[in-house]
């Protein structure tokens, strides 16, 4: 039975435990369906086979990300007239991305600044507010900085260079690049190919911004 083969017979060594761990995170986070309109509940009805397919394709190098469902939502704050583009992957693709995230997260976590709270494990917006509340009594000014249109304009080549700084695992290179290049499917069914940017909403976006941004900013200052 092919399902009893150990992962070492595959080109890439990806454990089935990591697949289950990624699924548990996806289930806990809930979320909407992707382009295949499959819900978490429907995915779970055939969980064993669905997770095996993800593991088998990732391990063999044959996994390709399906199109990402594009959804526009109003921006918060004073920008309610503007729309933010979200990309919603399928449930199986979220599991696949979660496996890569589980591998990469411990490697990049130690590179983050201690005052970085966005997308950090065991850190939240509430923690950031708590720190800000204490510091507002210690300082008389703050600096509000933002990289405008960051996710819309992310350079794929620089992103891949940043990934290579943190790992030598070929399967990570392969699939991160495929996720970056996955097309967007608009509400009318139109597929939009992407040569730059990454839609907000995918699990791996949490690993994109800080290491990438740090490297780009250093390059802009003439540092290597």
Image (cartoon, helix red, strand yellow):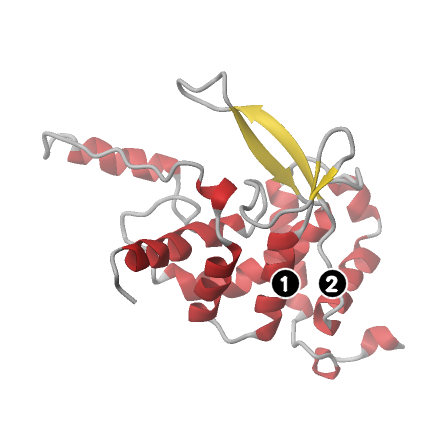
Left or right: residue 159 versus residue 35 is left
The residue under label 1 is: 175
Which percent across, then down, holds residue 114?
A: 27, 52
Find out whether the residues at labels 1 and 2 contact each other: C-beta distance under 8 Å: yes
Q: Callout 1: few (<14), some (14-19), or many (20+) C-alpha neighbours within 10 Å?
A: many
Q: Which residue is situated farthest in the bottom direction here?
A: 9
Q: 221 or 122: which is nearer to us?
A: 221
Q: Residue at x 66, y 50 (%)?
A: 94
Q: Secondary structure at mark 2?
A: loop
Q: Residue at x 63, y 63 (%)?
A: 175
Distance, label 1 to label 2, CA atoms, is 8 Å
Q: Is residue 102 visible?
A: yes
Q: Secondary structure at mark 1?
A: helix
Q: Quadrant of the C terminus?
A: bottom left
The residue under label 2 is: 63
Image quadrant in which you'd find residue 118: top left
Image quadrant in which you'd find residue 200: top right
Left or right: residue 14 versus residue 104 is right
Mark found first going from the N terminus, 1 or 2:
2
Which percent across, then down, holds residue 131?
A: 24, 38
Which percent across, then down, holds residue 40?
A: 74, 42
Q: Residue at x 67, y 76 (%)?
A: 12
Q: Is residue 2 above or below residue 20?
A: below
């Amino acid at each position: 039975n092919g399902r009893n083969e150990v992962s070492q017979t595959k080109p890439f060594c990806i454990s089935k435990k990591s697949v289950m761990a990624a699924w548990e995170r996806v289930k806990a986070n809930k979320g909407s369906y992707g382009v295949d309109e499959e819900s978490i509940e429907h995915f779970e009805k055939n969980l064993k086979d669905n997770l095996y397919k993800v593991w088998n394709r990732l391990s063999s190098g044959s996994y390709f990300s399906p199109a990402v469902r594009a959804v526009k939502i109003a921006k918060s704050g004073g920008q309610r007239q503007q729309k933010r583009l979200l990309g919603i992957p399928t449930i199986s693709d979220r599991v696949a991305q979660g496996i890569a995230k589980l591998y990469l997260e411990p490697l990049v976590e130690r590179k983050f600044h201690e005052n970085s709270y966005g997308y950090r494990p065991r850190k939240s917006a509430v923690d950031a507010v708590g720190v800000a509340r204490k510091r507002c009594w210690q300082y008389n000014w703050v600096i509000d900085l933002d990289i405008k249109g960051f996710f819309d304009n992310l350079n794929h080549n620089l992103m891949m260079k940043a990934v290579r700084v943190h790992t030598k695992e070929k399967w990570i290179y392969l699939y991160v690049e495929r996720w970056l290049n996955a097309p967007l499917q608009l509400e009318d069914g139109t597929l939009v190919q992407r040569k730059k940017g990454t839609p907000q909403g995918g699990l791996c976006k949490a690993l994109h911004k800080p290491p990438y941004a740090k490297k780009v900013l250093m390059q802009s200052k003439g540092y290597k």
